[in-house]
Image: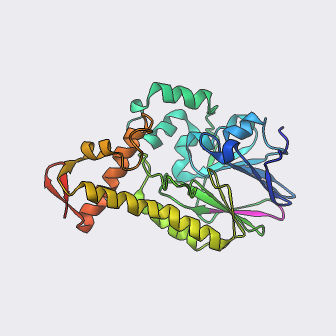
Amino acid sequence: MGGFTDTDLHLTDGVTVLTGSLGGKYPSGNTLYVRGSEESLLIDTSVSVVARGGAPGPVDRILVSHAHEDHVAGHGLYPAAKVNAHHEDLPGVHSLEGLFGIYVEDPADIDPDLAHTIVTDFTYTARPDATGFADGESFALGGLRVEVVHLPGHTRGHSGFLVEPAGVFFVADIDLSSFGPYYGDHWSDLEDFERAMARCREIDARWYVTFHHKGVVTGREEFLTQLDAFAGVIGRREARLLELLAEPRDLEELVEEGIVYRRETRPNFAIGVERRSIAMHLERLGRDGGVVEVEPGRWRAA
């Protein structure tokens, strides 16, 4: 069992943010520890939780915001704990192959080095015993209640958690970073992500907790300001795409330009992310009349 650290943030007597290294910057993240009078749980077990030897108290249950490697790193620490994820993302919690299927259409396309990293650096442990939850389901802990808020887009099952009456809303990978929304996996969806952000705007809380980067944002007004800036990245990507399509280009030419990731800094895996993200924008722009396909596989701004 790990202990509290000087950087942990105690929001209420029963709710603590176990802060990750470098403020939760990937590959780390900020885990939420919620302790009621009858049950205690962790939301998203990061590599930092593993490094500290676990939570600073008992863990009866683990809630998973979504099945990505950095959110499930600590499942092996608690073999007796119940594990719950949205039913859409359960395959990624149940098995490594299921996790790969969330990332790419064909799991055989996963880079072997990445697969090795997920098992070693992220200590991935399959939990075939994990069971699903749905939007609106709640977990009563004794004096505290955790409600599921389905926020798909990042993955199909990506979810936030509202802890009441503490007034804490864990928004997971709606992380308010300057990079902006990430919707580049096989199970991602641009328009679902936009709807998820719109739903976040409707929820009033005292604190908003992100898994990465921002950590804790205090008050709805400040959260909405940061959420608007985060969401605005989508529009800037789309504007850049239209600028590039002043002349006809195909998808691979657009990928080479680096609309989502800067070309000089993007890792190898990001090329596929770039391709899938741009394809979503092209699909929407084509449907809405913003671009036209001048010949098979080549688009131009309308």
Coloration mode: rainbow
Residue 151: image quadrant is: bottom right
| 48 magenta-colored | no
Q: Residue at x 14, y 49 (%)?
A: 296
Horizontally, residue 44 falls left or right of residue 113, namely: right
Q: Residue at x 24, y 61 (%)?
A: 286
Q: Residue at x 40, y 30 (%)?
A: 108
* Number of residue marks: 0
Give x and y (percent) for residue 194.
46, 64
In this view, the residue farthest toward the left is 295
| 144 magenta-colored | yes
- Assign the C terminus to one quadrant of the image: bottom left
Q: Residue 79: in sight, yes or no?
A: no
For the residue pair 126 and 218, the one nearer the viewer reads as 218
Horizontally, residue 81 falls left or right of residue 89, namely: right
Query: Looking at the image, is 6 positioned above or below residue 234?
Result: above
Give x and y (percent) for residue 247.
17, 54
- Assign the N terminus to one quadrant of the image: top right
Give x and y (percent) for residue 109.
39, 31
Q: Which residues are magenta?
A: 142-148
Horizontally, residue 299 falls left or right of residue 222, namely: left
Q: Residue 55: in sight, yes or no?
A: yes
For the residue pair 66 and 12, the one nearer the viewer reads as 12
Give x and y (percent) for residue 240.
33, 57
Horizontally, residue 227 falls left or right of residue 252, namely: right
Q: Residue at x 71, y 39 (%)?
A: 48
